[in-house]
Amino acid sequence: MDKKITIVIPYLNEKTEILETIKSIYKTIDISDFSIIAIDDCSKETIDLKQFKNVKSIRNAQRMGVDGCRQMGVDLSETDYVLILDAHMRFKQDNWASKMIKYIDENPRTLWCTVCLGLGYGTLDVNNHKGKYFGADIKLYTPKEKDRPCRQIIEPVWASEKEDREYLIQCILGANYFFNKRWFTYIGGLRGLKSWGTSEPWLSIKSYLAGGDCKITKEIEIGHLFRDNAPYSTVIADLVYNKLYVLKTIFPKEIEDKLMVHVPKDVSFRVATKDIEKDKIKIAIDKEYYQKIFKSSIYDLCQRFDIKLPE
């Protein structure tokens, strides 16, 4: 039987968590419909995944960052459908695989996410979780975010639950994203971003502006281990670069200028600005592509979801 969907799992210094995540997948679904691409982003320790027959294991010689690994996994997938996960997740016996396939079949231009079950702080049991999370809203600017200055613009914030079984959300969030590969590729995927950061708003906004949707299903619940600290470092300048890249490729100039006011002009900003200048030709090409495929504007999206624009 041909595989129906590819599961892409990047990981870095996760130790045995990648093993436990894959074991949980194997315990809860019929793997015959699935293949897994596990991408080791240059971890300190090598984890042997040979015990899993349907897993293609890749080890990067140099670190690409989680979003670069996700994009690589999607590019390498040989199926029409893709599920992106983190490497520290647990699953329920809720027929989640078949449900994902059905949702993508019926909604080929939609980015989906599932309910996220908060794990950690003493429990990795999906039936004894610490809370449920239901996708995100998009905050274009949060000037009070003084402790995380690189996140003062274009940030996802966990959204309130709605009553429906499935419904539109402003932004996917939770590292549980499944979609039609052709739609993901059409809207540009994660190309252009560095390392990690702003990827969920980036994808979600593009899906809407290109004429698609973002939705959550409450029929599927996936556990996600929340940690106080990641087992790797992130370059702050990369986080800032992604903000600037998103501003310059898909935002109108008048909104870009207003949001730029809220970006701290520190060392990371100066490094990111230099990199943006180096990439200006590529950015111009990307911007031209998005202008061709978009069917609506940022203003339309903000009006649709009552997203506050910068003054």
Image (cartoon, helix red, strand yellow):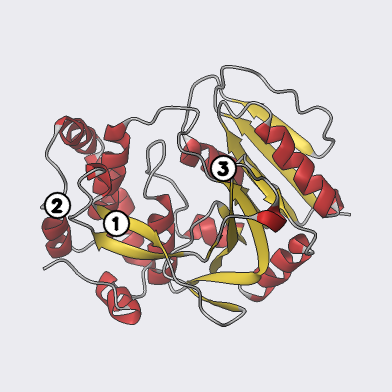
Q: Amino acid at mark 1?
A: Ile
Q: Nearer the viewer, mark 2 or mark 3?
A: 3
Q: Nearer the viewer, mark 1 or mark 3?
A: 3
Q: CA distance from mark 2 to mark 3?
A: 37 Å
Q: Which residue is mark 3?
A: 121
**Neighbour tally class for label 2: few under 14, some 14-19, many 20 plus, Cα within 10 Å:** some
Q: Is residue 14 above or below residue 220?
A: above
Q: Earlier in the sequence, mark 2 or mark 3?
A: 3
**Neighbour tally class for label 1: few under 14, some 14-19, many 20 plus, Cα within 10 Å:** some
Q: Nearer the viewer, residue 83 or 187?
A: 83
Q: Give the residue displayed 74% in from the left and 40% down from the top.
A: 22
Q: Amino acid at mark 2?
A: Met
Q: Earlier in the sequence, mark 1 or mark 3?
A: 3
Q: Nearer the viewer, residue 33 or 210?
A: 33
Quadrant in the picture for residue 176: bottom right
Q: Which residue is mark 2?
A: 260
Image x and y of residue 82, in percent? 64, 54
Disc 3 is placed on an element classified as loop
Tell me the quadrant of the picture where the N terminus can be found: bottom right
Q: Give the residue displayed 66% in from the left and 62% down from the top.
A: 221
Q: Earlier in the sequence, mark 1 or mark 2?
A: 1
Disc 2 is placed on an element classified as helix
Disc 1 to disc 2: CB gap under 8 Å: no
Tell me the quadrant of the picture where the C terminus can be found: bottom left
Q: CA distance from mark 1 to mark 3?
A: 29 Å
Disc 1 is placed on an element classified as strand
Residue 223 is left or right of residue 293, and the answer is right
Q: Which residue is mark 1?
A: 154
Residue 276 is left or right of residue 73, and the answer is left
